[in-house]
Amino acid sequence: MSLKAIASVLGLSVTTVSRALNGYDDVAEVTRKRIEEEASRRGYLPNAAARRLKTGRANTVGLVFPDSSLPLSDSHFIELLQTLDQRLARDEIDLLMLADKPQDQQRTLRMLRSGAIDALIVTHAMPQDIRLQRLQQKGFRFLSLGRSQLAQPYAWFDYDNYAGVKLATDHCLAAGLTRLAWLGGNEPSSFVRDRRRGFLDTVTQHQPLPVPLMATVPPSRRAGYQQTATWLAEGQQPQAIITDCSPLGEGAAIALQQAGRLSGPQAIRLFVYDGLPHDSIIDHPVNAILQCSQQHVGEKLAEMVLQLLEGTPVNQLQTLWQPRLHLTSD
């Protein structure tokens, strides 16, 4: 008994019948009950293995994220995941979250080999990323969030992180702010490296050559607060601080606010990549390096994944989005 036959008997679409029998919650409960009763009466049982044999796909995409609490505590990252999951669900594709634990990498490869997942989205790409190298060598489909150095073309989505920080640094130098401080994370991701390079390259091209303050710390609110408090306690305080992520930016903002240096005539200019978190306890606006909303990013990633599954060549699935600088009125 096929889904088409059940749909015909009940006067429903095949899509509605399929979604009801596969547990999606966008089907009305009354309709779901009718479908389940009819399927049971006719002895129909959905079979994932049979569907895979018929379509060659599991309709499941895995998403690999770092094995730490940091991504899942990042409101921007969570917003992206929610949009991505909702968009893929409209095409009846499930999103499977996979923590990037060394002991689980073989499990992920087994899932790809067995057909349990159709493709991977690998987040927080690194400059020399052994995960992506292995996937490419084995011929598995993947989309990288961030860029890496691989032997062959591959599908990727990225922001121009270098350009974003350059915008903020150029603005500071043009305004005569030469005592600059860089507050960056200590992760090995490509975006961390590119943002730091954007700052250093811009500073070293300026004449006379500024001597910036540099700090590499865990990308957390606590570390941002502690490092900023340390700079404020020193004699040569910065005129501007540029942070490479929201958590560090919020920590810096708290330290500046407590010292009376976030606003007013004695303010130290603060530039935060991605802006402050949505749930920030700081209600004073700060300068921000902004990209498209995370909803737009999630939609774009889903679109690229769907194209990847349909066989679009990977060299046509490479997207670089440009940032913009949002300045406060201070």
Image (spheres, helix red, strand yellow):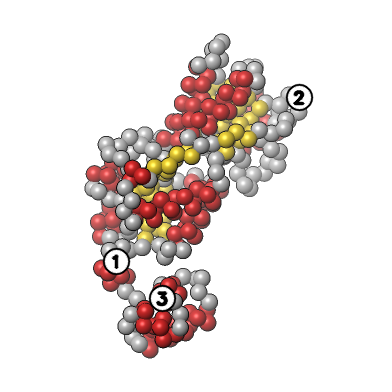
In this rendering, does residue 237 appear at all?
Answer: no
> How far across and how far down the image is residue 255, in percent?
66, 32
The residue furthest right is 265
Residue count near mark 1 (Cα–Cα under 10 Å), binned few <14, some 14–19, many ≥20: few
Q: Quadrant of the N terminus?
A: bottom left
Disc 3 is placed on an element classified as: helix
Residue at 30% from the left image edge and 70% from the top image edge:
51
Q: Amino acid at mark 3?
A: Val
Local SS, label 2: loop
Crowding around mark 3 (Cα neighbors within 10 Å: few <14, some 14 to 19, many 20+) is some
Nearer to us: label 1 or label 2: 1
Reading the image, the residue beneath label 2 is 265
For label 3, the residue is 14
Q: Which mark is first along the chain, 3 or 2? A: 3
Tell which tag, 2 or 3, sits nearer the viewer: 3
The quarter of the picture where the C terminus appears is top right
